[in-house]
Structure formats: C-alpha cells, structure tokens
Image (cartoon, rainbow, N blue to C red):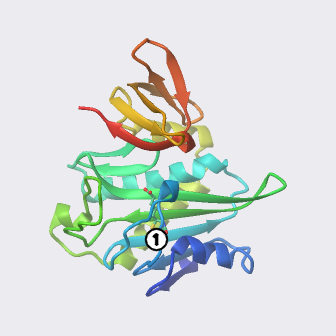
Amino acid sequence: MVNNMLWFEKCDSTMDICHRFSSICDRELIIGSSIQIEGRGTKNRGWVSPPGNLYLSYLLYPKHRKIHTIHMIGTLSVLKFLEQKFGSHNISIKWPNDVMVDEKKICGVLQENVFKNSQLIYSVLGIGLNVNMQINSEIDVPYNSVQLITNKTEDIKNLAKDITYIFHEYYMSGISDVEIMNIWRNNIDTIGKKIKLILLDEEIISGKVKDIDLNGDLVLNLSNNKLITIKAGMVKEMKISK
Ligand code: BTN
C-alpha cells in the first residue's frame, strides 16, 4: 500500500483527489499533499492546512472490513505512531476520532463513504496531523503539534509512510473488527468524563459518559439518571466539562 502513494505540492483537498481517482482506479491509493486550499473537517468545517502539517487520504475498497472499522483503524494508526514516538506523553482518543496529546488535539480523522443501491462502493479516509506547526491563530480549539512536543522539524513524507505502514498492518491483519473496536475503545479517554453536547438540531445535552457501546456509540448518563445513546453523526460539538 505504501508504494501506491502520490504526492501533490498543492491541492484543493486530498479527499477530493481520492474521489476523482475512484472513477479510474480500482486499486487502493494514498494521496498526500503539502498544502490544501480547501481542506475540510467533520461537520462541514474547514481544516486549516498550511505547509508543514500532514494531509493524507486513503482511497479504500474495504471488502473485508466493516465501514465503521475504517475510521477506528485510521485513528488508532496515528495513536500508535505517536505512542512509538512520544510514549511518555498522555496520548489518547477523544471520541469519536480526534487524537489528543496532553489533552490537546493533534490529529483529526474524516471518513467519506460512497454507496450505490446501499452497497459501499468505496471509502475515503482522511488524516490531518499537526506536525511542523507552532502557532496558528486560525485554529479555535486547544491544539498540539509534533514540533510543539519535540522542538524538531519532521520530514512529512517519511511520517506519511510510517503512519500508512501502521494503517496497512491493522487494515490487512487478522485482527477482527470486534478486536479493533475494543483497542480503539480502550484508548478513548472520554469515558467517565462530564460532557456537554450540541447536537446537529442545536439541542444541548449534558451528562457523564458511561461507556462506548459495541457500535462505537456514546452511552451518556443524564442528570436524571436516564441512559441515552448518541451516534457520532448526531453531534455538532462536544465539550468536556471540568
Ligand atoms: C476533523 O474535523 O477533525 C477531521 C479533519 C480531517 C482533515 C484531513 S487533512 C487530509 C484530508 N483532507 C481533507 O480535506 N480533510 C482530511
């Protein structure tokens, strides 16, 4: 898989490049870019994409994996890469797919799926990792970067290869989807925390996270002790309360 990597100096979004390639390419493909001018995140937000960070998308035809396992593998690959590099820091997943170092976001993962007659045709998985970045006033959440942690500059293409290698290992391994889900779940540090959610319809819900269930959904204990289940797709914004 690492050998199928194409690198762009500049593009709109590596997600869009994968979507375009899907019509002419039936092999899995990796697209990286040094800059994105229309980088996007979840919930129709933009993804600030200056030079120096990692912007990577995989075009995948996942016959042997459940759709939801793909974003878990993406998040886990970055988590494992960061653990190998900076084991002494507090590295975790903020549900559903942000990777945090010392409680600040360092990476976001985005999955876009294309269906025909409710059959998955392909999936594009995007990874945005803050690497050679110090201060960026456009980012409105507490953030981290590899450079802020190490004070060193990294080679982005090498880093893309390292993460893709780990991704490929999980993706093609004999580890079942259920086991992957459990590894992903065990690295989520949102369990036990008090949170406030703004849902897509603007409803605000507060509660304590009881668990992440077997579908990867959040089980929330409301103040009246009622348990409700929230899917990632229902959430516009999630804040951890102190
Ligand atoms: C998030 O909102 O946390 C997900 C961010 C995903 C950003 C990556 S960068 C590479 C790929 N191209 C994009 O336009 N978005 C994803």
Q: Quadrant of the N terminus?
A: bottom right
Q: Quadrant of residue 206?
A: top left
Q: Residue at x 46, y 71 (%)?
A: 39
Name the residue furthest top. 224
**How far across and down, in percent of the image, does residue 173 sit?**
59, 53
- Please give left or right for residue 81 compared with residue 176 in the image: left
Name the residue furthest bottom. 9
Q: Residue at x 53, y 43 (%)?
A: 200
Question: Where is mark 1, residue-wise?
Answer: 39
| The residue at label 1 has a CB less than 8 Å from ligand 1 | yes
- Please give left or right for residue 41 compared with residue 87 in the image: right
- In the image, what residue type sits under mark 1? Gly
Name the residue furthest right. 117
Helix or strand or loop: what does disc 1 sit on?
A: loop
Q: Residue at x 45, y 53 (%)?
A: 75
- Asked if residue 194 is positioned above or below residue 56 in the image, the reply reads above
- Asked if residue 242 is positioned above or below residue 176 in the image, the reply reads above
- Asked if residue 48 is positioned above or below residue 181 in the image, the reply reads below
- Asked if residue 143 is positioned above or below residue 210 in the image, the reply reads below
Q: Quadrant of the C terminus?
A: top left
**How far across and down, in percent of the image, does residue 7 sit?**
49, 84
**How far across and down, in percent of the image, does residue 117 sit?**
84, 55
**How far across and down, in percent of the image, does residue 126 sit?**
51, 64
- Report the front residue among 156 and 37: 37
- Please give left or right for residue 27 compared with residue 238 in the image: right
Neighbour class for label 1 at 10 Å: few (<14), some, many (≥20)? many
Q: Residue at x 52, y 48 (%)?
A: 72
- Report the front residue among 229 and 175: 229
- Please give left or right for residue 210 compared with residue 143 in the image: right
